[in-house]
Amino acid sequence: MSSDKKQEQAIQKEFDGQVRDIRSRLSEQLTCLDKRSEVEKEVLQDFQEFFQSRAEIEKDYARRLERLYENHAKKRRLQTPSNATEPQIPSTIACWNVLMDMTRSHQKHHQILGTIYGDHLSSRFNHLKDALETVYRKSREMTVEVHMEILRVVNELFSALKSYHNAHTESKRAGHKFKQTEQQVQQKKGSTKEKSLEKQLEKSMGKFQECQLKATKCRNDYLMTLAATNTTLQKYFKQDVMSLIDCLDLGYVSQMKRTLSAFHSAELQVQKLHTDCLRRLEIHLKNLDAGKDKDLFLFANPVHFQPPVPFQYQPHGGDEVSTVVGHHDILYDELTSKYDNSLSRVETLRMETDEIKKSLDAVLSTMRDERINILQEDVTRLFHSLSPKNNLIIQNTDVTRSSSLRRKQTSMESEVYYLGKYKDYLQKANSQARIQSRLELIQDALSIDASQQRVVPQRHAGKSMKKMRKRPKSVFKTTLFGGDLEEYISITGTDIPCVVESCIEFISLYGIDAEGIFRMPGAQTEVNEMKSKFENGEDPLPDLGAKGDVHLVASVLKAYFRELPTPLFPADMTAEFMEAVRCSDTDEKIETLKKLVEQLPTPVMVVMRYLFEFLKVLSSHSDENMMDTHNLSVCFGPTLLHAPVDEDLVTSQSHLIDVVDHIILFVEEVFPKTPGRHFKDGNSISPTGSLDTIAESTCDGSEDNSSVSILAIARDDYLSQNSEELSFRKGQQMHLSAKVDNNYWRGSIGSQEGLVKCTHVNIPELSSPGPTSISSGFSQENINRLNTTLANALTPPDIVQDHLLPRPLSTNSSLPSSPSRPAPPVKPKPMRPVPSVRRHVPSGGNGKSQTM
């Protein structure tokens, strides 16, 4: 019996531990639910305070916009002519009106947002907080009741357990007593106490059977109560607790979603309205036209800008002669002398004004492009740092600030230079007009046929005297402009389309030094006529000769690549090319571009290589044509590559330009040597002279290479990254003494010595073995002479040059002068100082351009 007692105590102790664990869990559940409710209330309170503050900010912003609109709308009304009868207004004022309308619209939009945030969303979150508190209080009461029911069931299980233990103990006692009585009956059998013992045995058996039945009933009750209790606990923890949590959150999430959806809808509506305003502004930006504004201004002020009534000839004392006469010998000689001098002066002024006009156009175009590019680059850089894909941080703010100041100073110098040149242009043009009017009167007096005696200026004096070879008419019937490039090459069997080959040959012969080539467009009517001739299989360029318009030919070449149905750079590879030029390491950048080029179809690669080899040669004449690699890439970038659809046009434009810029610079490294034809420049001089860069020898013919240095030319600007590297500018000469590794040479610039980055300089490929050997085909005298020529020719080019030196008239020109009075010689005028201008340096890995 003592063992049974110990077993009961152990069972009761285990049961008490389980009950304490259940009570603890239920209590912790209530604590967690209370904390969760507090957090939800705090979240709702934060939402309410946020939207209340946001409403105040929106309303304050709306009030400020309203004041801004009222202040500047008055200025707009003052600027608009009150007596204007013409409904049209200048495009700049139209943009101002649109900006004012946008400001007014934004004020209304933000006023509505303030009302929505303050009166609707904030109050809605407050109501949601009150509703959540009420629902939670009632749900918590229900949860407590469920907990009490669980504890009651556990108590019932404990009572059933105790009853079962007691009944089973009593049954065991009755059974033991029954066995003892049965033994006594067996021992006393035949004695006088046998009958009494039998009665006692019957009584003990009845008691035993009764206790056994009671124990069985208690065990059954205990088992059923145990099953019910376990079912209750499992159901609560697996089902009921989830349902109770749902009751605690009744309507919380759905109401939150509905309220925030209202916020989302309001923001979308405002964004849509803002987009409509921006689209309207974009339309007016496209309509900005200085020419139309000038016409409207002149229309509004017709009297003040109309030419006055010409002065009339006033004869004196009955003189009726109103023309210049030269029938007298003395008058004839005098007029002939004046005619010769005036004609020479007119032609000189014409050449000077033509050159100044070209310089003005180039400066104006460069200033406009640089301002647009710099502004877009600055704006893009500010928003580019917000992109999650690009967390670039500007490390050196001093360099950025100095670069901005340098650009501002350069812009001011360019403006001053432009105004000074334009003043000179007006003076010379006016002088030319006055002399021309005198010349016409003298022509009439001397009866000179101006059409036959006109002096032709030497426009093509600097052009090649070679002639283009004539090509037979094509017999293939295939589309050229707007046709598929690979299909055309497959049908015709040529590596290079005829229009590409002919236009590049013409420009290389006659327009390699033409200022603003590919930037100044040709006449559209003539472009269409030339395109039609090419489509018919003809080549009209050989017949033009040296007097042809190179800008017209350049426009035809650009039109061919622009009208290709598939751009020269496939659209599906544009993003990869853009990503390649963002790399900061030049060697890795070149290798990536090389791998991408190898993926192109062979016909496309051959045409692309031919074009970029030509552009590389063309950029080497930037001293004369003002078209360095950056300017050429600005012209060809949008033509050869199309911006990806998923990227912003303004952001991707600079990357497209950088792709073309880098390929022009590294065309030899990027493209394979085979198969197909290469562009052979037979007219122009390479950037390092008529020969490759020649190594200077300091050993006077000695075969020892230890004292030989290589003369190299900087390919572009480079800023040193550490104290051991040398900084240099584009076109600067340097002497390389020894190769350190694949990336650096040991060299010197003047008195400075250090490491030179290989990828930024043009290093000659020497003919004899060894890194510093000199070609044996040149004497030391020729080498020194060529190096002197190179030093004079490779001065860093300015983006604008003064072309005021008049070209001397050819001795074969037919000057209309009298036999006895030759035309006076033309005196050259001094060169004007040219302001320093911004230089383009290709970017590193971020895809942006730097300025030096």
Image (cartoon, rainbow, N blue to C red):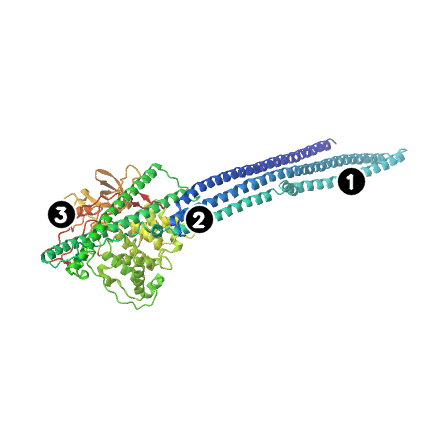
Give the mark nearest the N terminus, 2 or 3: 2
Mark 2: which amino acid?
Leu
In this figure, which residue is indicated by the disc labeled 3? 781
Mark 3: which amino acid?
Glu
Picture coordinates of residue 202, whole percent (x, y): 86, 37
Picture coordinates of residue 756, whole percent (x, y): 26, 42
In the foreground, 317 or 561: 317
Most extreme residue toward the bottom is: 475
Q: Write down the quadrant of residue 189 in the picture.
A: top right
Q: Write down the quadrant of residue 597 in the picture.
A: bottom left
The answer to whether residue 741 shows anywhere in this view is no
505 left or right of 485? left
In this figure, which residue is indicated by the disc labeled 2? 278
Tell me the element at label 1. Answer: helix
159 left or right of 544? right
Give the mark nearest the N terminus, 1 or 2: 1
In this figure, which residue is indicated by the disc labeled 1? 217
In the foreground, 752 or 173: 752
Tell me the element at label 2. Answer: helix
Quadrant placement of the N terminus: top right
**Label 3 CA crowd tier, 10 Å (few <14, some 14–19, many 20+):** few
Give the mark nearest the N terminus, 3 or 1: 1
**Label 1 CA crowd tier, 10 Å (few <14, some 14–19, many 20+):** some
Q: Is residue 814 above or below residue 840?
A: below
Mark 1: which amino acid?
Lys
